[in-house]
């Protein structure tokens, strides 16, 4: 087969579909499960500030993603950003480390959503441990089967799933407004609040959970090679997603807090379903739970779609195992990458617990992906100048400095065990990179021209 006849990624994802993919990734089971965790950590009505903190970090960090994503609209997102940012001397190592951790971290993200799905399913039907694992594992398999198709069909499925997300959130928010005490959580948000070290520490721990619920605003960057008019649509889809999701999260939290007492919110495992039960009865609560499960399903779908492009991008560039560079001959998507990540996620969904996964996901990603590519952007601007970029952030470099500082604070807040785990993954990745370079008879850190 000639080079011209080789299958290629198709640019067929519109701005609507890109926004839908981002938002469905962001609003998974996370906000419904994490809501009680955040309230318990913060120990007061000011738990809403943790959701604001997550939105602020997402917005600031999205400026970094937008400047890089609009300029390098290629499959793999951060793989390309790190390679370009750190240049020929260190770029290969940084991009390899990102793919290395993605092979672990991406299945963790997928598995966390699947486990959350099975956990919330228990509100409708009581399940023992193995029945729950069977549901989470089956969900991963179903997602892989749905994604095994052309990108234009996936874009349409994403919009359909996104509509389910919006309907669910609208019902929950509308229920709180209907109850009549909607403004009370806002009016009393500062009751008993003391700005001190204890509050800062609690905000840090709680923000680890809320930020987990915002992750996914950058999913469109991983699909850069399939976005129509990427220079405009990549930044637009991210900012629309963040503003939209931040509004929905805050409104949903206010809605729940206006109906349920804080003590119940803190202790409940199914807080949103219980909220609907108080307002509309048990039948409505079951319907709401089914819609929440729809949202969780949509999130797994979107996350798996984006992550499957990362090993493909690295393999196409000769920096990862060649088998991952294969595209389906007729459907034009990286099917090997999809199948491998899906298989690992399936195993994780059977072995791990949700509470263990959330902090592990952040600790593993912050240093290389979020802080790493922010530093890489500074280096890239220094080498090529601001005019090189298709989209430029306002007030450069202030957003980058803020993003790095906040990510560092969140990294510390994940806890000593997770920090050591994240550093261990990076250390093993460096060893793997050196072994790979030795086998290929390459000098691992090429000299600058």
Image (spheres, rainbow, N blue to C red):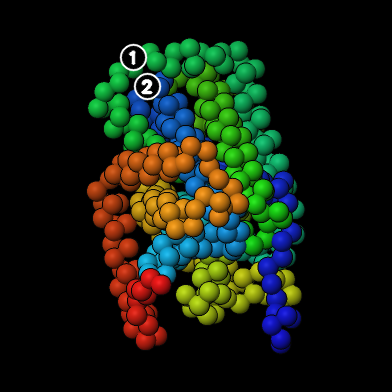
Nearer to me, 206 or 324 = 324
Q: Is the residue 104 above or below the residue 295 in the image? A: below
Q: Is the residue 274 above or below the residue 82 in the image? A: above
From the top left corner, tell me how far across and down residue 445 is, in percent.
34, 73
Q: Residues within 10 Å of mark 2 (few under 14, many from 20)?
A: some
Question: For residue 412, which numbered disc appears in the image?
Answer: none
Residue at image location 34% in from the left, 80% down from the top:
443
Nearer to me, 115 or 235 = 235
Residue at image location 37% in from the left, 75% down from the top:
446
Q: Secondary structure at mark 2?
A: loop
For marks 1 and 2, give the CA distance.
Answer: 8 Å
From the top left corner, tell me how far across and down residue 375 is, in percent.
39, 52
Quadrant for the N terminus, please: bottom right
* Disc 2 target residue: 44
CB within 8 Å, label 1 to label 2:
yes
Quadrant for the C terminus, please: bottom left
Q: Secondary structure at mark 1?
A: loop
Nearer to me, 116 or 76 = 76
Does residue 209 appear in this view?
Answer: no
Q: Nearer the N terminus, badge 1 or badge 2?
A: 2
Does residue 444 appear in this view?
Answer: yes
Location of residue 303 (image quadrant): bottom right
* Disc 1 target residue: 192
Residue at image location 59% in from the left, 40% down from the top:
239
Location of residue 242 (image quadrant): top right
Left or right of 66 on screen, residue 155? right
């Amino acid at each position: 087969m000639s080079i011209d006849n080789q299958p290629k990624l198709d640019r067929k994802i519109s701005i609507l579909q890109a926004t839908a993919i981002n938002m469905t990734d962001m609003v998974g089971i996370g906000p419904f499960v994490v809501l009680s965790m955040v309230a318990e950590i913060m120990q007061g009505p000011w738990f809403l500030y943790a959701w604001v903190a997550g939105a602020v970090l997402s917005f600031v960090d999205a400026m970094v993603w937008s400047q890089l994503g609009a300029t390098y609209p290629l499959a793999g997102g951060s793989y390309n950003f790190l390679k370009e940012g750190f240049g020929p001397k260190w770029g290969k190592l940084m991009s390899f480390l990102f793919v290395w951790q993605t092979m672990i971290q991406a299945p963790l993200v997928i598995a966390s959503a699947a486990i959350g799905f099975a956990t919330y399913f228990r509100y409708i039907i009581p399940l023992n441990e193995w029945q729950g694992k069977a549901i989470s594992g089956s969900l991963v398999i179903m997602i892989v089967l749905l994604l095994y198709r052309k990108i234009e069909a996936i874009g349409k499925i994403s919009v359909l799933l996104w509509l389910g997300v919006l309907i669910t959130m609208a019902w929950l928010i509308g229920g709180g407004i209907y109850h009549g005490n909607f403004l009370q959580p806002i009016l009393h948000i500062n009751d008993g609040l003391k700005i001190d070290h204890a509050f800062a520490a609690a905000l840090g721990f709680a923000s680890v959970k809320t930020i987990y619920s915002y992750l996914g605003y950058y999913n469109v960057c991983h699909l850069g090679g399939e976005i129509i008019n990427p220079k405009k649509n990549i930044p637009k889809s991210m900012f629309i997603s963040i503003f939209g999701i931040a509004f929905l999260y805050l409104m949903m939290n206010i809605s729940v807090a206006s109906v349920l007492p804080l003590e119940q919110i803190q202790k409940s495992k199914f807080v949103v379903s219980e909220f609907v039960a108080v307002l509309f009865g048990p039948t409505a609560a079951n319907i709401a739970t089914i819609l929440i499960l729809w949202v969780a399903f949509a999130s797994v779908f979107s996350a798996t779609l984006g992550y499957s492009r990362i090993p493909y991008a690295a393999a196409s560039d000769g920096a990862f195992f060649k088998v991952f560079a294969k595209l389906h001959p007729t459907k034009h998507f990286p099917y090997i990458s999809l199948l491998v990540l899906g298989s690992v996620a399936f195993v994780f969904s059977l072995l791990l617990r949700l509470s263990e996964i959330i902090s592990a996901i952040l600790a593993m990603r912050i240093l290389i992906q979020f802080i790493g590519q922010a530093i890489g952007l500074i280096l890239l601007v220094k080498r090529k100048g601001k005019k090189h970029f298709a989209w430029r952030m306002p007030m450069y470099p202030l957003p980058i400095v803020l993003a790095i500082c906040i990510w560092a604070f969140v990294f510390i807040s994940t806890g000593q065990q997770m920090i050591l785990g994240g550093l261990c993954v990076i250390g093993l990745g460096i060893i793997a990179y050196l072994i790979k370079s030795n086998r290929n008879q390459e000098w691992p850190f090429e000299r600058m021209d």
